[in-house]
Image (tube, grey):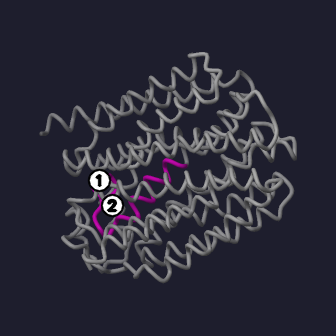
Amino acid sequence: MRDRAPFVLFTLVVGYGAFYLCRANVESAFPLLAHDFGFTRTQLGWLSSVPIAVYAVGKVVMGGLGDVIGGKRLILLATGGSIVATLAFGASASLAAFVAFASIGRFFQSGGWSGSVSVVAHRFEPERHGLVMGVMSTSYELGNVLAILLCSAITSALAGWRPLFLINPLLFAAVGLFVALALRDSRGRPSAVGGAPALTRLGDDDPSLGPILAALFRRPPFWIAVVLSVLLTFLRVGFLTWTPTYLYELSTTAGHAAISGSIAKSAIFPASGVIAALSVGALSDRFGPGRRAPVMAVSLAMVVALVLILAHGHVRSPMVAALLIGGVGLFLLGPYSLLAGALALDVSGRRGAATAAGIIDGAGYLGASTAGVLLGKVADARGWPAAFDVVAGAALAATLVAWAWAVVVLRRR
């Protein structure tokens, strides 16, 4: 099993990264949908917020399902449902239909990460979970970058927004076939060294979620991870949702070329996360399981400073704005990558990995479901500086929580 570990990790990175083919296309289409249908930023915000709220519910539902049916089966279920919903989105022509099919797609997509975490829990030893989940976390950043660049290329080459919802799901289907052939079922397989002791005492053959949930809810670090997930996912989703539109509105030109360029520039945010996830995951392993808070606290303090520059630095250049947003990604997405990855594994073990990841991630996306509408309304009413002030407030709250946790962790060393 160990000799297949690199290939398993590669398959998971490719498989989960491909989910963004049917996710990044929605936000990338915002300027095009606004142009074709006259949607306001508030209306576009609903197209972000409602699907993300459904995604949050799906995280909890699918997370529990993953610990019952196995990681591979959950990944394939999530892939198939997402493809069908995305094709239906592309055949629609009203805001209500867009919201409905984006929500259905997000519900199925919610199982992708929990399924992947379940596979990792059974295939890799706990002492390497920080590094392994750091590598795994590059999947959603690399996948996001490549999906955004693909959307930019499609927008530049083909007229309208509909090609984004035909080409992307067809490519996703090809990746799903690869995962189906390459990945063995992880249900019931032990990890190489064994899971964390907190939940493995429950027994690997116990399919009941009750004991898993009871053990999780008794652990204070689990609840801290939930709180941080709410705040950091709000920040991440806010930038992913609005960066293409924000950069386009800073542009001095209009038309498809400007939209395509803005979409491409927005890729700097998830691209920075690739570096962040790898470095923060490996660095946090030096502190050990359950002791990753100091790394998160230092990184998040930098996020506050950079967002305040965006809010009050009188940024006028799309390139300067993109570089600042890339800096935010560098310091935000490392801590974010730990939450439903290494931290979920720290507090769970192999039997509860998918459940812990699903709840932590689900809580985060429930909080993040407000990002689309809230930031859209604030930007409509008071401009982008005010919207960035809201973002800075959330970043400061996350920093304070992480610092408080770091103090507790360092005192125990």
* Residue 137 or residue 116, whichever sits in front: 137
Instruction: Count numbered badges in the picture.
Output: 2
Q: Bounds of the magenta span?
A: 343-365
Q: Work out whether 315 lies above or below 184.
A: above
Name the residue located 49 percent from the left edge and 46 percent from the top edge.
Answer: 271
The x and y percentages for residue 273 are 45, 45
Sort mark 2 into few (<14), some (14-19) or many (20+) by Cα contacts within 10 Å: few
Contact (CB < 8 A) between labels 1 and 2? yes
Q: Looking at the magenta stretch, what is its main secondary structure? A: helix
Q: Amino acid at mark 1?
A: Arg
The x and y percentages for residue 146 are 57, 55
The x and y percentages for residue 136 are 39, 59
Q: Work out whether 381 lies above or below 119.
A: above
Question: Is label 1 in a helix, a strand or a loop?
Answer: loop
84 vs 313, left or right, is right
126 vs 270, left or right, is left
* Residue 323 or residue 352, whichever sits in front: 323
Task: Determine which residue is flagged by label 2.
Answer: 214
Question: Is label 2 in a helix, a strand or a loop?
Answer: helix
Q: CA distance from mark 1 to mark 2?
A: 6 Å
* Residue 338 or residue 275, whichever sits in front: 275
Q: Residue furthest left?
A: 413
Q: Is residue 145 magenta?
A: no
Q: Quadrant of the C terminus?
A: top left
* Residue 257 or residue 96, whichever sits in front: 257
Name the residue located 41 percent from the left edge and 41 percent from the top edge.
Answer: 228
The x and y percentages for residue 143 are 53, 57
Name the residue located 38 percent from the left edge and 27 percent from the top edge.
Answer: 301
Q: Amino acid at mark 2?
A: Ala
Task: Determine which residue is flagged by label 1.
Answer: 218
